Amino acid sequence: MRFLRLLALPLLCGLALPAPAQQAADKTLTKLETARTANPGSVAALRSLGIAYYKRQRFADARTVLDAARKLDPKDGVSALYAGLAAEALQDFTSAKDAYNTYLQVGKTRSVRNDIRSRLVALSRSEMHAAAKTAIASEATIASEANNPRTVAVLPMTFNGTDQTLAPLSRGMSDLLITDLARSPDLQLLERDRIQAMVDEIALNQSGRTDAATQLRAGKLVRASRVVQGAITQTGARNLTVNAAVVAVATAQQQGRDVQTSDVLDQIFTIEKNLALGLFDQLGVRLSAADRAAIEQRPTRSLQAFLAYSNGLVAEDEGRYGDAARFYEQARSIDPGFGAALQKAQSARAAQAGAQVTAAKVESGLKNSAEGAQVAAAEKGVAATNTTIGTTLANAVGDINPSAANSVNTTTSGSQGQTQTQAPPATRDATAEKTGTDQPATKTGQVTIVIRRP
């Protein structure tokens, strides 16, 4: 949300523009709209107009125009970047991620690519909650659709006990069960983060109230065919009892009997393995010897490392990425072999960095770059082209026959459309130096340039 709040700042500034400045801005926009109308097939005209719309907070218009430019030239990085910024401002996080991923493939500015990589990690949480809101709004339609019978959602477990420091184990237990149940090719497990986001969104609409009915509803909205519901109960200072059941989403009827297992707290991994095996029976899955062997593997044997990992899951679900990373790193320090903790720590750090990447930071990264020149031209009402024929020729020849002669500096003036080429300092190659002649063997190549009529 911080990202979106920062995006709103230019709007407030725009409303306070002096009349002459506002008139100049309107004149620039009109100029670009006229250029688009005169040449609707011009990527440069569409890109510049889209950037201008974005700068004026007209995000829907910007995305429409920029998407048209992307369709004409899928390799235009600036169009993809600003389409992503516009989509994110509109809270269409799925489209924003698509556009940003395109920029990672075709964009030319390294610092911006680094920022976008971080931003994509942070956007995942926003995307999941946006998807949850959309699903709730379309609940009637979703309820009438048939779901894949193989799809299973392990819902967040509840914790009942006096020692609340153990409460995060409910997230960790669900995480372990998803990993183990997913080892069977007969089941398709949904992501824990996606399920948690749905439960959180439903709870938000119900003033924080959650119950078994809420969780079953969440399973339906994530399009699961069956859900696993369970609870961890602390029975004494060092004992746990965990029970779980499989429920058919369509009928809300329990499938088979409850699966229940108890042991001392230090045997929590044995508890989870017994629970997983019992759930496979209730789900009607027969395991191969290889599947059973895989399930017996344990991510860690340290209760304290797993508890730290579980605390990390809670923090990450709440969007506290810095805290989450510290918990995961703590788990890793307790057990250096805890691979899942390392992966989670890296992801949380990336999400933390991404949360600091604002639209303003992304745009500032374009300064003093070729892509930044296209943005600057758009702000002046100029439809800057991606490249000049001279640059294209130099690049093509350089790819075929790299030499100092091909290292020319080409600049383009967007307003005049003039190209100025500056030759590099004269040099003599090794052959000329040895023979004392200025006529070394020549290198030839053929370049074919196709210029399409607009």
Image (tube, grey):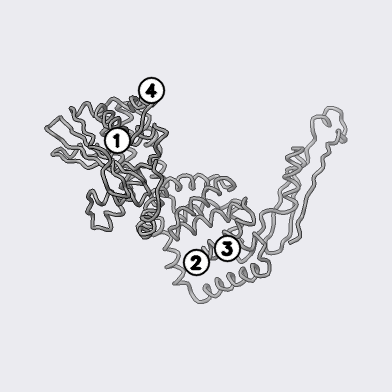
How packed mark 4 is, by other alpha carbons closer than 10 Å (few <14, some 14-19, many 20 or more), is few
What is the secondary structure assignment of the residue under circle 3? helix
Q: Amino acid at mark 2?
A: Arg
Residue 289 is marked as 4
Along the polypeptide, which appears first: circle 1 or circle 4?
1
Q: Nearer the viewer, residue 47 or 219?
A: 219
Which label sits in the foreground, 3 or 2? Answer: 3
Question: CA–CA distance between discs 3 and 1?
Answer: 53 Å
How packed mark 1 is, by other alpha carbons closer than 10 Å (few <14, some 14-19, many 20 or more), is some
**To which residue does mark 1 refer?**
282
Which label sits in the foreground, 3 or 4? Answer: 4
Which label sits in the foreground, 3 or 1? Answer: 1
Residue 1 in sight from this viewpoint: no
322 is higher (above) or lower (below) than 43: above
Which label sits in the foreground, 2 or 1? Answer: 1
How packed mark 2 is, by other alpha carbons closer than 10 Å (few <14, some 14-19, many 20 or more), is some
Label 2 close to label 1 by CB (< 8 Å)? no
Along the polypeptide, which appears first: circle 2 or circle 1?
2
**To which residue does mark 2 refer?**
58
Position of residue 170 in the picture relative to residue 28 (left or right): left
Question: CA–CA distance between discs 2 and 1?
Answer: 54 Å
Question: CA–CA distance between discs 3 and 4?
Answer: 56 Å
Residue at 32% x, 36% y is 283
**To which residue does mark 3 refer?**
65
Q: Quadrant of the C terminus?
A: bottom right
Along the polypeptide, which appears first: circle 3 or circle 4?
3
Q: Nearer the viewer, residue 358 or 410?
A: 358
Q: Nearer the viewer, residue 233 or 17?
A: 233
Q: Amino acid at mark 1?
A: Gln
Q: Nearer the viewer, residue 7 or 422?
A: 7
Label 1 close to label 4 by CB (< 8 Å)? no
